[in-house]
């Protein structure tokens, strides 16, 4: 399989931004961060830190998942 180009990723992002469906948010987070799809999907509300100079999402153990290993924290 050929590697993705920057132009292809831009097209995917534009397509995600144009479709107003809830699942697009998880895909956009994954596209922009490289997270596993389970990390934004299984994140809890308190894992989203929006009142910070740099808004971010903590991928950490919670009541839904403990997929993070000690090394991957």
Image (tube, grey):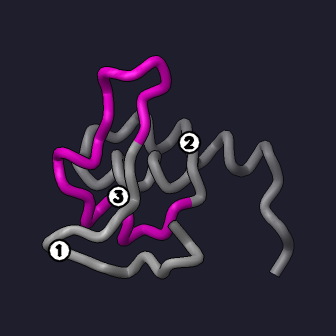
Lower sequence index among marks 2 and 3: 2
Measured from the top left, where is residue 44 in percent x and y?
Answer: 19, 55
Lower sequence index among marks 2 and 1: 2
Q: Residues within 10 Å of mark 2 (few under 14, many from 20)?
A: some
Q: Quadrant of residue 40?
A: bottom left
Q: Which residue is mark 3?
A: 40
Q: Secondary structure at mark 1?
A: loop
Residue in the picture at 17% in, 46% down: 45
| In this view, the mark in front (2 or 3) | 3
Measured from the top left, where is residue 57 in percent x and y?
Answer: 39, 46
Q: Is residue 32 above or below residue 53?
A: below
Q: CA distance from mark 2 to mark 1?
A: 28 Å
Q: CA distance from mark 1 to mark 3?
A: 11 Å
Q: Is residue 69 above or below residue 8?
A: below
Residue in the picture at 51% in, 66% down: 73
Instruction: Evaluate if marks 2 and 1 touch, with contact meaning CB atoms under 8 Å apart.
Output: no
Q: Which residue is mark 2?
A: 13
Q: Horizontal placement of 47 versus 15: left or right?
A: left
Q: Secondary structure at mark 3?
A: helix
Residue in the picture at 38% in, 65% down: 39
Number of marks: 3
Q: Which region of the structure is painted magenta?
A: 35-56
Measured from the top left, where is residue 18 in percent x and y?
Answer: 41, 34
Q: Is residue 10 above or below residue 12?
A: above
Residue in the picture at 34% in, 41% down: 19
Measured from the top left, where is residue 37 in percent x and y?
Answer: 42, 68
Give the numbered dot on residue 37: none
| In this view, the mark in front (2 or 1) | 1
Q: Horizontal placement of 5 versus 60: left or right?
A: right
Q: Which residue is mark 1?
A: 64
């Amino acid at each position: 399989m050929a590697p993705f180009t920057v132009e292809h990723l831009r097209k995917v992002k534009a397509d995600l931004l144009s479709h107003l469906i809830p699942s697009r948010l998880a895909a956009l987070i994954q596209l922009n961060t490289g997270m596993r799809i389970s990390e934004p999907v299984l994140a809890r509300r308190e894992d989203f830190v929006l009142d910070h100079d740099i808004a971010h999402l903590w991928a950490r153990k919670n009541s839904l998942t403990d997929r993070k290993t000690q090394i991957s924290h």
